């Protein structure tokens, strides 16, 4: 984050630029990992058919919201998300279940859209939120990892290149 400041980028735009940069850097690795997950048979293609469009819709919503969100708010949301994930790890994933079955139908759309919105605003690949969320919703760990891996290239590319102009005071 300090690198942007050394180039004269305002503190208000630093988190926004860091998010876009982080998303793009992850794309080549996620493509390779997606192919490996597919070859190993861990992907549920039927689940992905419902998950990916909702995730991309969430990315678009997150990008529009991010346009108006101050960088400080993005940092706070990022910190809260890290805290919740650490809480899940401390409690143990085997005891931390929000639902008895993996999300489907409208719930799947809501969860995927929320993950898309949050992850693009934070500049993290969807796996940072997808895997722990799906595991907490009783989705098998290998399937959650494969889902996160499979959705990351589309999510990260969308989050990097489809960025609306930032709101400026001038």
Image (cartoon, rainbow, N blue to C red):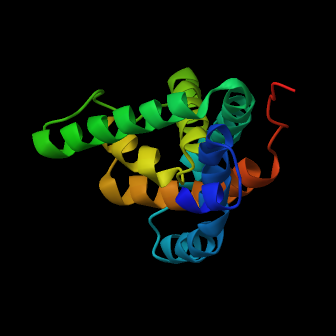
Task: Give the image quarter of residue 8.
Answer: bottom right
Side of 51 relative to 164 (left or right): left
Side of 78 relative to 166 (left or right): left
Residue located 51% across and 77% down the image: 36
**Image: 129 above or below 65:** below
Nearer the observer, 44 or 142: 142
Q: Quadrant of the C terminus?
A: top right
**Image: 145 above or below 91:** below
Q: What x and y, as percent, mark residue 127?
A: 47, 53
Q: What x and y, as percent, mark residue 118?
A: 54, 35
Side of 93 relative to 61 (left or right): left
Residue located 59% across and 45% down the image: 15
Residue located 37% across and 37% down the image: 79
Q: Quadrant of the N terminus?
A: bottom right
**Image: 30 above or below 10:** below
Residue 153 seen from this side: yes
Residue 138 seen from this side: no
Side of 67 relative to 105 (left or right): right
Nearer the observer, 165 or 23: 165
**Total label count?**
0
Residue located 71% across and 24% down the image: 68
Task: Give the image quarter of residue 64.
Answer: top right
Q: What x and y, as percent, mark residue 109?
A: 59, 29
Nearer the observer, 60 or 38: 60
Q: What x and y, as percent, mark residue 124?
A: 52, 51
């Amino acid at each position: 984050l300090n690198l942007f400041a050394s180039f004269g980028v305002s503190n208000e735009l630093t988190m926004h630029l860091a998010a876009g940069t982080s998303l793009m850097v992850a794309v080549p690795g996620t493509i390779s990992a997606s192919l490996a997950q597919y070859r190993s048979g861990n992907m549920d293609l039927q689940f992905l058919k419902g998950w990916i469009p909702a995730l991309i819709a969430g990315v678009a919503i997150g990008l529009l919201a991010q346009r108006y969100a101050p960088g400080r708010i993005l940092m706070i949301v990022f910190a809260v998300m890290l805290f919740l994930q650490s809480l899940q790890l401390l409690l143990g994933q085997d005891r931390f279940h929000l639902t008895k079955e993996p999300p489907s139908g409208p719930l799947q759309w809501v969860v995927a859209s929320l993950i898309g919105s949050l992850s693009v605003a934070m500049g993290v690949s969807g796996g940072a939120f997808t895997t722990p969320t799906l595991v907490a919703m009783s989705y098998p760990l290998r399937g959650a990892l494969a889902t996160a891996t499979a959705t990351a290239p589309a999510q990260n590319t969308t989050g990097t290149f489809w960025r609306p102009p930032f709101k400026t005071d001038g």
